[in-house]
Image: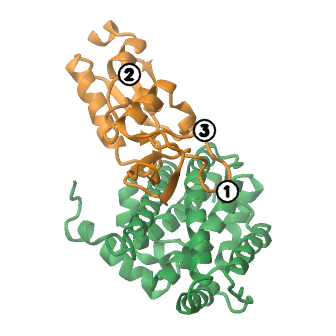
Amino acid sequence: MVTSNYSSEEVYDLIAGIPDPEIPVITIKDLGILRGVTLVDDTYVVTITPTYTACPAMGMIEDQIKEILSAHHIPKVKVELTYEPAWTTDWLTQEAKLKLKNYGIAPPSHSSCSKLFTVADKVICPRCNSTHTELISRFGSTACKALYKCDDCKETFDYFKCH
Amino acid sequence: MNTQEATYKYALRLGDSALVLGHRLSELCSKGPILEEDLALTNISLDMIGRTQALLKYACELEMQGKTEDDLAYRRSENHYYNYLMTEQPNGDFAHTIARQLFISVFEYLFYTELEKSKDATLAAIATKTLKEIKYHMQHSVEWTIRLGDGTAESHKRMQTAINDLWMYTGEFFEMDHLDMFLLHQHIAVDTHPLKAKWQDYIKTALTEATLIMPIDSYMQTGSKKGIHSENLGHILSEMQYLQRAYPDAKW
């Protein structure tokens, strides 16, 4: 079989660079969506986890994984969705956070939130680095973001919520 | 009834509540009172549909009939749906939407916190995942309850009316039937009886801050665990299931 030409690690590397469909500056590896690849008999089992339960990007990510691997003549691929362990913004690397900031999205300000009834902690404007920012809406253009505005540069911006 | 059959039904009930509320909230898409609320309500709807997908998919695995979550969503009639009656209540004015959200999200916060400890690993994992989202829903509904209750005379009146109108659907949250008890003994289901006092505390705190009066328990509506519903569910399903009924097996 051709599949034996690739180790699970090599398959992982082939797909690690797939960009997130909604935030294309970061990859599914950066985000922590790609959990791992294992070889079961002659099938590569790719495990992914959604950021939010209903993340609409999952179908597209699955298609892209299959497309890339089929281009490398790896026919037997199974993409499995797991909820365990639950995705958290703690998995974002420092590098990924910097990429988000440069893209104009304020990265999560600290580790995952478990508190109730608190207004999110100080969010820094990704454009002018001001801390004078204000929450406009807890729910933004995608499930993982909230909408903020900067009181100094007056720009509105997305904030990647702690999760 | 064995454990697997009971767990199937349990997952189905939870999935149905998420599905029907998700559909109700999706009706507000492009009709929210302000743009930010349009986004918020449809985001919450999306979270609900995501949770539905996870729960109904698990139900299919337990049922072992080769069905998909879409089959369960689109091919059952109302007497085979087990969602809480609260979830099918109409959106009404914004106060009614918020009151429904307040009652449900506080209950779900308490419920899924307990379900996280379930001996059923899949249900526990779904609970952990969905709980992160529920906290946002709860925060959202509590803030709006306070804002409307402690707002203008008109918003106060409407919020109080909504709280009073929907109160009779809150009793169902804390019912335990034979299926719940059977699974509770196996440490799979949540015991909802002790949640009632906690739920009342949270609601009372929110209502007090909102200068609203907490209703006194009187007649409580019931029936959803047996598949008995208000007229609303039929109308919801006729819209939600239209495509699969008109064009069976249609694919995206």
Residue B172 location, quadrant: bottom right
- Residue at x 63%, y 43% (from the top left corner): B121
Q: Nearer the viewer, residue A37 or B245?
A: A37
User: Where B170 falls versus B161 (above or below)?
Assistant: above
Q: Mark 2 lies on which chain?
A: A
Q: Earlier in the sequence, mark 2 or mark 1?
A: 2
- Residue at x 60%, y 38% (from the top left corner): A110
Dot 3 crowding, Cα within 10 Å, few <14, some 14–19, many 20+: some
Secondary structure of the residue carrying numbered label 1: loop
For the colour green, the matching chain is B
Residue type at tag 1: Leu
Query: Which corner quadrant holds the N terminus of chain B?
Result: bottom right
Dot 1 crowding, Cα within 10 Å, few <14, some 14–19, many 20+: few
Q: Which of marks 1 and 3 is nearer the N terminus?
A: 3
For the colour orange, the matching chain is A
The CA span between labels 2 and 1 is: 41 Å
Q: Which of marks 2 and 3 is nearer the N terminus?
A: 2
Q: Mark 3 lies on which chain?
A: A
In the displayed structure image, the side of residue B95 where residue B26 appears, left or right: left
Q: Which of A52 and B232 is in front in this view?
A: A52
Residue type at tag 3: His
Q: Is residue A87 visible?
A: yes
Mark 2 or mark 3, which is nearer to you?
3
- Residue at x 53%, y 71% (from the top left corner): B82
The CA span between labels 2 and 3 is: 35 Å
Which mark identifies residue A116? Answer: 1
Q: Can residue A137 be seen in this view?
A: no
Residue under label 3, please give it.
A110
